[in-house]
Amino acid sequence: MPKKEQRRLRIGVLGAGQIAQAAHFESCTKAANADLFAICDVADDLRERMAVTHGAAKTFADYDAMLADTDVEAVIIATADAFHVPASIRALEAGKHVLCEKPVGLTVKEAFDLARAVEASGRVFQVGHMKRYDAGLQAAKAFIDTEMGELVALKAWYCDSTHRYPMTDAVQPLIVTSANARKPSANPKADLRRYYMLAHGCHLIDTVRYFAGDIVSVEARLSERAGIWCWFVDVEFANGTLGHLDLTVAVRMDWHEGFQIYGQNGSILGKTFNPWYYKSSEVDIFREADGATHRVLGADGHFYRRQVEGFARTVLDGAPMTGADVHDGTASVRAMVAIARSVDEGRRVTLAEVTGGV
Ligand SMILES: NC(=O)c1ccc[n+]([C@@H]2O[C@H](COP(=O)([O-])OP(=O)(O)OC[C@H]3O[C@@H](n4cnc5c(N)ncnc54)[C@H](O)[C@@H]3O)[C@@H](O)[C@H]2O)c1
């Protein structure tokens, strides 16, 4: 493991549920420049068990009490989506840096409210789009930024698999649940169309924005047949790149995620794995300059730990943010709303139309 550095960010994790147990607790304990300092959850059984398992120095049942602790320097918000914005704003107002799970919010209005709070706070705020810490995607991004020249076209797909649970159950720790856990008043899975877009679509949108930048407009079609939700989205990027997205939940096959990018001086083909295998994407970068294909191994595929380290480097060392900031998170929410509206209204929708009133 990376050797622990002397100065480490003291992180408090809000929420001891699925994502915290599968990713954030271990990421904080393994991170070179951070520690799992505190765990906060209203569920006493869950919180205390996780504190013992992961060795957190302090535990809190009450979020405000954790925020009042001056030893806590930053928080990870690992709660249901509905709580992201209020919990983030409270943390920023308490002077904490924030790494918040995706999607950053449920509506454009609350994402804008959060963006204002981030600006007013002067604190570091990052969204948990951990795919930006996949070494394969980072190699693609470096090629795009330095050598690829004009981007011409980008296709990207994110197809969840009907076989995902046997796969993740095999590699994740046993997830401990509690009847005392706090859940949002409305069941997020009551509307699967919306739920799938928020849970999965935001990963796909952030990945393509990472590569090709801002999205200007979308034209989307949705098929709901045979228990499969399949969105095909034609995307117009601000830099003129032609874009096509395929979000399908769930394909009758293995996890199927990847991208193809064509540019002036080369092409990129990427295959991404189910994240819980912690395997960096296989990304083949063909360079016209030497007529050869290059592929980074990315031996360290712990995207979640690398995300915590990147966040901590920004907080502790003032390093430029390597993850998604609040504007990236907001742009993803706007794109998701635009896609939903395009499906409903059968027309191309510009992101400029999707304002805080939504
Ligand atoms: N990045 C990824 O790959 C990825 C994967 C899965 C889930 N997620 C995201 O992670 C988030 C959390 O999902 P989950 O399934 O772990 O949620 P969960 O509901 O299982 O766990 C959340 C926990 O937070 C606690 N909690 C909520 N509000 C609280 C409060 N105010 N004070 C104290 N405790 C509080 C609850 O009691 C619960 O135990 C979601 O936004 C989801 O989209 C991200």
Image (cartoon, rainbow, N blue to C red):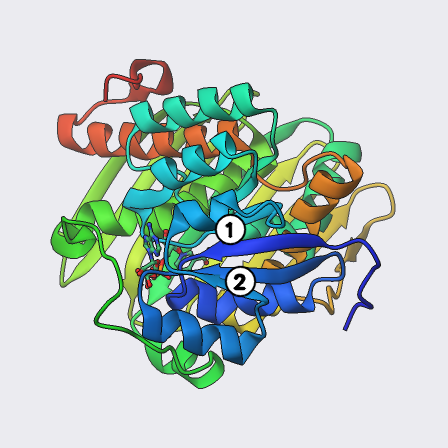
Decide: few, some or many residues near mark 1? Use Cα within 10 Å; few <14, some 14-19, many ≥20.
many
Q: Residue at x 23, y 28 (%)?
A: 342
Instruction: State yes or no: Cβ of the residue under disc 1 lies below 8 Å from any atom of ligand 1.
Output: no
User: Where's the C terminus, which quadrant?
Assistant: top left
Decide: few, some or many residues near mark 2? Use Cα within 10 Å; few <14, some 14-19, many ≥20.
many
Per the image, the residue denoted by label 1 is: 76
First in residue order: circle 2 vs circle 1: 2
Is 123 rendered above or below residue 257?
A: above
Determine the quadrant in which ligand 1 lies: bottom left
Is 290 rendered above or below residue 89?
A: below
Q: Residue at x 28, y 31 (%)?
A: 107
Amino acid found under the numbered disc labelled 1: Ile
In this rendering, position of residue 251 left or right of residue 271: left
Per the image, the residue denoted by label 2 is: 24
In this rendering, position of residue 52 left or right of residue 201: right
Instruction: State yes or no: Cβ of the residue under disc 2 lies below 8 Å from any atom of ligand 1.
Output: no
User: Where's the N terminus, which quadrant?
Assistant: bottom right
Provide residue 249's location: percent of width, then percent of height.
28, 58
Q: Give the SS element for disc 2.
A: helix
Q: Nearer the viewer, residue 235 or 137?
A: 137
Q: Residue at x 65, y 46 (%)?
A: 311
Q: CA distance from mark 2 to mark 1?
A: 8 Å
